[in-house]
């Protein structure tokens, strides 16, 4: 039996967030939009989250809870994608929340522009730093990547995706910075990408999270993701990640001879000059000495 299609599936991975889960789900429930389902994927959370998920499902007919063995954030998102019945998918991390008037304006924008496959909207990231976006439609994903500097905000959240983009695309399980690996794959399949100034996603900074505590292995994965991307990332962005990788591991992954592109600060210009004339190995060693570790 084929399940009926609704407009939007909101996928919320759940793990050790008993203090924030109800606020997160509540921010989605308060949206003035009914044609959506909320999928809570409990990734074997060891706290009270499984019970909270079941309670929310009992209280709200548009919430579905899925309990699974622990597999990590990517596995939870992938489960949600497989279960989604919506024409579009969006992700909300369970320690974050949405501004009240977010989903309806986004869906209105998609209805006004029916060819859009991926829509990105503003985010309040941390310390009142806000990702602001213009209202613009891109017929070329590379233009979107370059003009918005999308390589700096590859977040899985703060985007709405046509569900069909995920056919043959999954988040890489067992890898960190999974969104950096995944977004370019989705963009390759998207015919039309857009940004909007409507709505707002609130990201709760987690000092014990993967990004904040990233060390050698995690940073290596981040650099490998950018190097494998089919979309060009400015050299200075790659260099700065490589310098962090070298400081933690002593590994050099970035080749010599990459083209210098993009505007940057005076400090970064000096790094680029050293890279161009002395090579990546010499730059890494000099940078480590100057940093004193």
Image (cartoon, rainbow, N blue to C red):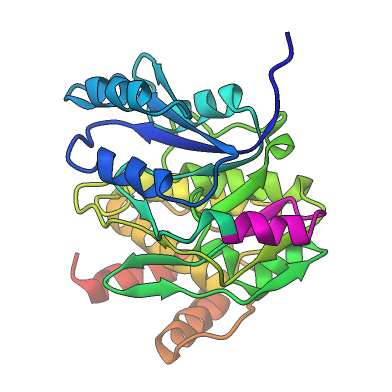
Question: Which quarter of the figure is the N terminus placed in?
Answer: top right
Q: Which residues are magenta?
A: 105-119
Residue occupying image coordinates x 32% and y 51%: 211
Number of numbered markers: 0
Rendered location of residue 246, percent (x, y): 36, 57
Taking 174 as reference, is 287 above or below it?
below
Kindly tell me whether residue 283 is visible in this rendering: yes
Which residue: 50% across, 56% down? Answer: 158
Image position, residue 94 (x, y; %): 33, 41
Q: Is residue 259 among what the camera can see?
A: no
Q: Is residue 27 above or below residue 287?
A: above
Front one among 287 and 76: 76
Q: Position of residue 272 (x, y in %)?
A: 51, 80
> Where residue 98 sits in the image (x, y, percent)?
40, 55
Task: Identify the image quadrant of the C terminus.
Answer: bottom left
* Outermost bottom residue: 266
Residue 113 is one of the magenta-drawn residues: yes
Residue 135 located left or right of residue 123: right
Q: Residue at x 51, y 46 (%)?
A: 179
Name the foreground residue: 70 vs 52.
Answer: 52
Q: Is residue 111 left or right of residue 12?
A: right
Residue 164 lies in magenta, yes or no? no
To which quarter of the image does residue 68 belong?
A: top left
Which image quadrant for residue 50?
top left
């Amino acid at each position: 039996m084929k399940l009926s299609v609704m407009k939007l599936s909101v996928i919320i991975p759940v793990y050790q967030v008993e203090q924030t889960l109800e606020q997160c789900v509540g921010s989605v429930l308060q949206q003035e939009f009914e044609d959506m389902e909320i999928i809570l994927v409990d990734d074997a959370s060891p706290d009270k989250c499984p019970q909270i998920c079941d309670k929310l499902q009992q209280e709200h007919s548009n919430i579905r809870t899925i309990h699974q063995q622990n597999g990590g954030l990517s596995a939870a998102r992938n489960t949600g994608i497989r279960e989604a019945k919506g024409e579009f998918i969006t992700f909300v991390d369970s320690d974050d929340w949405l501004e009240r008037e977010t989903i309806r304006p986004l869906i209105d924008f998609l209805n006004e522009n029916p060819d859009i496959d991926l829509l990105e909207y503003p985010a309040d990231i941390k310390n009142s730093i806000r990702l602001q976006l213009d209202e613009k439609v891109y017929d070329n994903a590379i233009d979107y990547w370059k003009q918005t500097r999308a390589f700096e905000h590859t977040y899985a959240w703060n985007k709405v995706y046509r569900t069909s983009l995920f056919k043959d695309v999954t988040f890489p399980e067992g890898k960190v910075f999974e969104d950096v690996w995944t977004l370019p794959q989705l963009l390759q399949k998207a015919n039309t990408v857009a940004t909007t100034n409507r709505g707002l996603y609130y990201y709760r900074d987690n000092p014990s999270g993967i990004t904040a505590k990233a060390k050698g292995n995690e940073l290596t994965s981040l650099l490998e993701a950018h190097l494998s991307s089919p979309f060009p990332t400015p050299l200075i962005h790659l260099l700065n990640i490589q310098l962090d990788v070298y400081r933690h591991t002593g590994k050099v992954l970035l080749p010599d001879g990459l083209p210098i592109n993009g505007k940057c600060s005076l400090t970064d210009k000096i790094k680029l000059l050293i890279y161009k004339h002395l090579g990546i190995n010499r730059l890494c060693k000099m940078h480590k000495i100057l940093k004193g570790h």
